[in-house]
Amino acid sequence: MVVVQPAGWQEPEEDEQALESSEVEVRSLVVGVTQHGVRLDKALAELVPELSRSYLQQLLGLGLVRLNGVASLKPAHKAKAGDALAVEIRPTQQSQAFKPEAVPVPVVFEDDHLLVVNKPAGLVVHPAPGNWSGTLLNGLMGRDPKAMLLPRAGIVHRLDKDTSGLMVVARERATMDALVRLIAQRQVSRQYLALGHRAWHGSTLRTVDAAVGRDPRNRLRMAVVDLAQHAGKPARTDFECLAGNDLGCLVRCTLHTGRTHQIRVHMASIGHPLVADGLYGGGIAAGMARQALHAYRLAFVHPVTGQALEFHAPLPEDMQEAVLQWALRYNGAAAA
């Protein structure tokens, strides 16, 4: 099973410098019943979903948010239903990133409530520094105007840029909230196929139960950490070796938690870093130029119709070719 944090996933550090523009938007908002009693920065994040909470906190600190006419508020101030907000938004790359674009979205299932996509490797899911356009989110907005009315265009979980495979996306708010609950309750099952370096030894089945947190030696990556000494969260992954030889292994990965880079970190921790995953010790091999990870199975109960849904996406061509190359090289070496 997989648990992710769709409403507040970890985002990279952002440079929120305003663009060179004199344009300023003052947005008038009213705190709703659902925001009553919550922190002001959180209420703002719900009311202005296209901007990050960190950026909205900066606006608060600069006195650019007025609550019932009063500025210089603290992020922890409690909002009340009916409060009038005036937010002065200055243009940034981030604020201008949430727009429809003609980005191809490979859809494998769609109804009035949700859709399932097979994300290709190389496609960024959500706008972020260095990738403010051409993302899956932009493509979702481009194919369906209703997506513009949803936080993050209905995206409730994500895959890394270079990871391919299946994702579920909501098409309406009620469905989005229901999917968030299913994920939090571990009722969305997702499995991956990965290519790891080196031969797999011992039992074909292995469980890694090791907390994952920021690497204390390199804040740009994650690592297995000791929770007694470093911040992190419990993480568990089941691995099953499906095939392999002395060159590498094809592994099925089942998540029980959804930590950032969890499979990549756990595979590296047991001596099998993913092929071409340079961040965690994997080298380019068998023609793979991106991390060899693919979300091939997705299963859940439809939150509206109650139908049990299960989807499979076969290995993409680059991973198929890598498996074939390994087999041919190994067999050739054995024959010699």
Image (tube, rainbow, N blue to C red):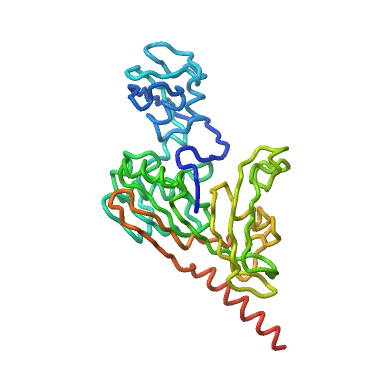
From this viewpoint, is residue 3 visible? yes
Residue 306 in the image, given as x and y percentages of width and height: 30, 53
| In the image: residue 5, left or right of residue 79 | right
At x 49% / y 70%, what residue is drawn?
A: 317
At x 43% / y 49%, what residue is drawn?
A: 134
At x 61% / y 55%, what residue is drawn?
A: 264
Q: Quadrant of residue 238?
A: bottom right
Residue 107 in the image, given as x and y percentages of width and height: 35, 59
| In the image: residue 43, left or right of residue 197 | left
Q: Is residue 324 or residue 157 the one in the foreground?
A: 157
Residue 186 in the image, given as x and y percentages of width and height: 47, 49
Q: Does 38 appear above or below 156?
A: above
Q: Residue furthest left?
A: 112
Q: How many marks?
A: 0
Q: Residue furthest bottom?
A: 335
Q: Does 107 appear above or below 319?
A: above
